[in-house]
Amino acid sequence: MEDRKTSLGATASPLCEPLLPGKRVNCTGDDDLEAHLPPYRATGASFSKTCLNLTNAVSGIGVLSMPYAVSQGGWLSLALFAVVGAVCYYTGTLIERCMRADSSITSYPDVGRFAFGAAGQRTIAFFMYVELYLVAISFLVLEGDNLDKLFPGASVDLFGCHLHGKQLFIVLAGAVILPTTWLKKLGMLAYVSALGLVASAALTASLLWAGVSDEHTAFPGRNSNVLNLAGLPTSLGLYFVCFTGHAVFPTIYSSMKNNKHFSQVLLFSSVLCSLNYGITAVLGYLIYGDDVQSQVTLNLPSGRLYTKVAIVMTLINPLAKYALLVAPITSAIEERFLLVGSAPARVAVSTTVLVSTVAVASVVPFFGYLMSFIGSFLSVMATVMFPCLCYLKIYKAQGIRRIEVAAILGILLLGAFVAVTGTYTSLLDIIGTF
């Protein structure tokens, strides 16, 4: 045991001692994709600080689509939202158990390598990078839609191109974000992104304000559905988006002073986020009914103070987090083409990635459909399929209780159903809007 070394060159502490002695994995090498993950390296984080970090990682722009998700599936779909929240919490604890299997595991792709070798690592990393890229695109779509609501009718001629409305503001948002993608150290942005928690609370407060002051809002039982089976795949996909964040669980787990408390932190964060999501969903659907848009902020009446507050606060989150999202993508490209350490290369790669996301965001027709696709296909893989499969592979030799195996198989079936039906539905919706 004394000769054991982790892949990071650190000596394992008693708390990090592997639960499965003798099982090792080499996580070094030039092709390591997990080395490019965003750094959550605040080693020795306290319980309260970890709660903040984890809540910030789980909460996000998914809250904007919660009323729309309920409108798609009906009021009874909120029961499925509770199921999704419970499932995502449980799969988060599975990731924790996988982390405890070996002290060399420090990231999500490490879990895949430990369970399934290099192929597992590359598969998880691939899905992570694609999800990060699409979420970055959704951030720009969010910026464009909401800024267009704040400044309707804006247009400008730029280099012979006429830009107006949503496309104009997507380009402007990209220009504002661009310098942040050139930074090598993104620690300050990680702290700024914590304002997203304030933005979520401000959105909920604005909806409550709108419901009290707006005379033209819908009322309970009017223009709403109890259950819409055809829209359930879309609802489920959007619900899964709300709890995506499993990719950073391992690094947050590693940053704790006492990682034995990770499950408690996860429970606290899951409950807090679920309450915020649920309140937003109920308020938004009560007020606007089936007329609610894919981003509930677009339903808020123009010119009102609470509308401006909600939109401005909502826009802070994407502006602060975009650079954190694309950092692992740009780093992977630099590593692939041996450009690490070159400042001009970093600027060129970061700029190219941002321009590509701006171009795609300009033609994406509907925020809700994109978020549903991300949730149905990519988030389900990261939050449901991979944790369950890796846990079964790592611990099957040690023996897993039959009831737990049955529960995991049920979760895998749910994940497969959402992945197939939700992806199919969201792709049809996206294609149908062109």
Image: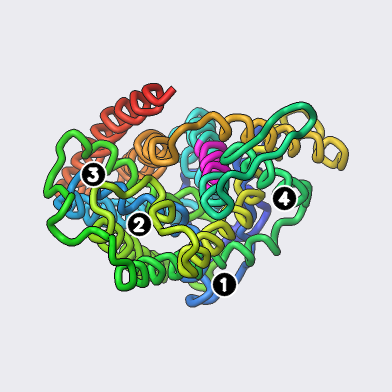
The N terminus - image quarter: bottom right
Q: Residue at x 81, y 34 (%)?
A: 348
Secondary structure mostly taken by the magenta-highlighted segment of the chain: helix
Q: Secondary structure at mark 2?
A: helix
**In this rendering, the label closer to the viewer, 4 or 3:** 4
**How far apart are labels 2 and 4 at the CA level?**
38 Å
**How far apart are labels 4 and 3 at the CA level?**
44 Å
Q: Which mark is residue 93?
A: 2
**In this rendering, the label closer to the viewer, 1 or 4:** 4
| Three-letter amino acid code at the position of disc 3 | Ile
Residue for badge 3: 408
Q: Position of residue 385 (x, y in %)?
A: 34, 38
Q: Please, is residue 431 above or below residue 231 in the view?
A: above
Q: Earlier in the sequence, mark 1 or mark 2?
A: 1
Query: How many neighbours does mark 1 have within 10 angstroms: few (below 14), some (14-19), or many (20 or more)?
Result: some
Q: Position of residue 214 (x, y in %)?
A: 33, 67
Q: Is residue 241 left or right of residue 328?
A: left
**How far apart are labels 1 and 4 at the CA level?**
32 Å
Q: Nearer the viewer, residue 376 or 72?
A: 72
Q: Position of residue 261 (x, y in %)?
A: 41, 71
Residue 404 in view (yes/no): yes
Residue for badge 1: 45
Residue for badge 4: 176
The C terminus - image quarter: top left
Q: Earlier in the sequence, mark 3 or mark 2?
A: 2
Instruction: Find out whether the residues at labels 4 and 3 contact each other: C-beta distance under 8 Å.
Output: no
Q: Is residue 337 left or right of residue 129?
A: right
Q: Which residues are magenta?
A: 131-142
Q: Quadrant of residue 294?
A: top left
